[in-house]
Amino acid sequence: MAKITYIQFDGTKTEIDAENGSTVMNTAIDNLIPGIDADCGGECSCATCHVLVDPAWMEKVGAPSEQENAMLDLNPDREENSRLSCQIPVTDELDGLIVNLPEFQY
Amino acid sequence: MSEVAASTPFNPDPYAIPLDSKFNVAQARLFQQDAHWAWFDRLRSESPVHYCDESEFGPYWSVTRYNDIMEVDTNHQIYSSEGGIAIVEQAEDFRLPMFIAMDPPVHDEQRKVVSPVVAPMNLKKLESTIRERAAGLLDDLPTGEEINWVDRISIELTTQMLATLFDFPFEERRKLTRWSDVATASEESGVVESEEQRRQELFECLQTFTEIFRERQARPGNNDLITMLAHGESTRDLLDRPMEFLGNLILLIVGGNDTTRNSITGGVLALNQFPAEYDKLRANPGLITTMVPEIIRWQTPLAHMRRRALVDAELGGQQIKAGDKVVMWYVSGNRDEQAIENPYEFAIDRARPRQHLSFGFGIHRCMGNRLAEMQLRIIWEEILKRFDNIEVVGEPTRILSTFVKGYSDLPVILHPRK
C-alpha cells in the first residue's frame, strides 16, 4: 500500500491509497483521475500515461526500460523526470510518491 | 502483378474454400464489396496467425487477433518496418523512403522533427481555424437534396486542414487530394492510367514542394510542416535526397488525408446503421468525446500495416522465419471479441473507446492521432448544431484497396434542425 499524490496541470491535487500489485497508471484509471489516457491499457506502447515524477522521488522510482525509453522519446515534451506510469508498479517503498500530470497526452 | 489476381476465381464466401495456404484475404475486391469480415472471422477463430504462400503480393503471414497484432507492433527489433509498411512492394526503381518505413535510429530522428507540428499545443492554435472552415463548409451545403458526402465534406474538410498544416497555397489545395489518391492508387483502381502517369504526377508533387521548401528555407519562424522540415537538423538537407523528401511528403499527405476523410464518412454511415446511437448522440452531444475514438475503431481507415521479420520468431504458436512478410490486419483486431466487447456494435459510449488498433502501437504509432480526433470532434460539434439528421439514402461506394479502407461516394440528404 502506498499513498500517491497526483497533481493535475492546473494544480489540483488528489491523494489515493494505491494497492500493491497495481501500477501508478492503473491506480489513476481506477480512481477516475483525469489527465491519463492509457490508450494501450498498460503495454508500454502508446505513451499516453506520461507523468512527471517529483524530482525527490526519481531515485526510488528508477530509470525507464529500453522500450519505455523509446516510447518516451516520441514525446516532444519529454523531461528528465518523464516516466510512463503504466511502468511504475505500486510498492510500499513508493509510499508518499508525488507525480505531476502533463498538460497533454500525445 | 495482376496475373495471379486474374486467374484466381473470386468467391466472396470464405467458408466455400479450404483454410489452407491458398486462403488469401489480401484481395482488394473483398474490401470493395465489404465482404472481408467473414474471412477475418474465420482466420481469427481457426488460424489466427496464418500463412498464405501465394498472392499478388507474394507470400505473407496474416496476423488477425488483437493481442498478436500488439505483439508484432511493439517488437520493432524483430518485426522491421524498413522498406515498406503496406503489403504491396514498392517498385525497385521507384523507392520512396519515409520515416514510417524505417527502423531506429533514423526513424526516431526524422519523426522528432515533424511531430511537434501535430502536438496538442500546436493543435490548440489550429482549432479555431479548423472550426471556422468546417462551419463555413456546412453552412454552404444544400438541404433536402441528395449530395455526395465524401466529396462535399470529407474530402474538402481534410484537404483544407492539410493545406493549413503545410501552409500550402489554399486555392490549389485539391492538388493535395490528387497526390494523396495517386500515391495510394492500385493499378486496377483507375485513378491513374499507368505507372508512368503515377510517377509523373508524384514528380510534380516533388517539384511543387521543392519550390515551397526553398522559399521556407529563406523564411524561418513559421510552424507549418515544410518550414519545420526546411530547418530541422536531420531534414534541412532533404532536397539533396529527393526521393526521401517525396516519401515523407507522401507520408504526411496520405497520413493526414485518406484516414481522416474516411473516418468522417464512416461516422455518418455508422450512425445510420445504428440509429439508436444517433438518438443517444442527439440527446447528449457530450458523447462526441467517446464517439470519436469509436468511429476510428469502427472504420479502421487503414486496414493493415506490414512488417518483415529480421530473425526467426514464434508468434501465436507459428514459426515465423527471418525475411517473412508479416501483415497486421488492424481491421480484424478491431473486431476481436476477445479484446473488445461486442466488437461489431457501434457504441458511442464505450468505457475505454481508445483501446483500438487503428493508430497502431509502439514506436510507429500514428503521430497525428490527436489531430485526427480533434478534426472529428469539431466536425461533429458543428454538424449537431445545424442538422437534425444526415440521412444516408443509398449504398456507399467503397475503395478498391487492401490498405486504404474507405469510400468514394456516400449519398446523403441533410435535414436541418427544426
Image (tube, rainbow, N blue to C red):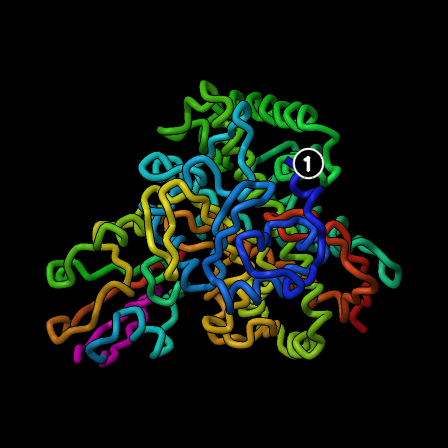
**How many neighbours does mark 1 have within 10 angstroms: few (below 14), some (14-19), or many (20 or more)?**
some
Classify the position of the C terminus of chain B by image quarter: bottom right
In the picture, measured across the screen, residue B88 lies left or right of residue B194, that is: left
* Residue numbers of the magenta segment: A1-18
The image shows residue A13, relative to residue A67, as above or below, that is: below
> Does residue A79 appear in the picture of this structure?
yes
Classify the position of the N terminus of chain B by image quarter: top right
Q: In what element is the residue under mark 1?
A: helix
In the picture, measured across the screen, residue B166 lies left or right of residue A91, that is: right
Is residue A3 covered in magenta?
yes
In the picture, measured across the screen, residue B223 lies left or right of residue B348, that is: left
For image coordinates 71% across by 76% down, the residue present is B275
For image coordinates 46% across by 71% down, the residue present is B339
Residue A80 % position (x, y): 21, 50
The image shows residue B123, relative to residue B96, as above or below, that is: below
For image coordinates 62% across by 65% down, the residue present is B38
In the picture, measured across the screen, residue B260 lies left or right of residue B10, that is: left
Q: Which residue is mark 1?
A: B187
Q: Nearer the viewer, residue B39 or B144?
A: B39
* Prevailing SS of the magenta stretch: strand
Q: Amino acid at mark 1?
A: Glu
Is residue B130 covered in magenta?
no
Residue B44 % position (x, y): 51, 65
The image shows residue A80, relative to residue B34, as above or below, that is: above
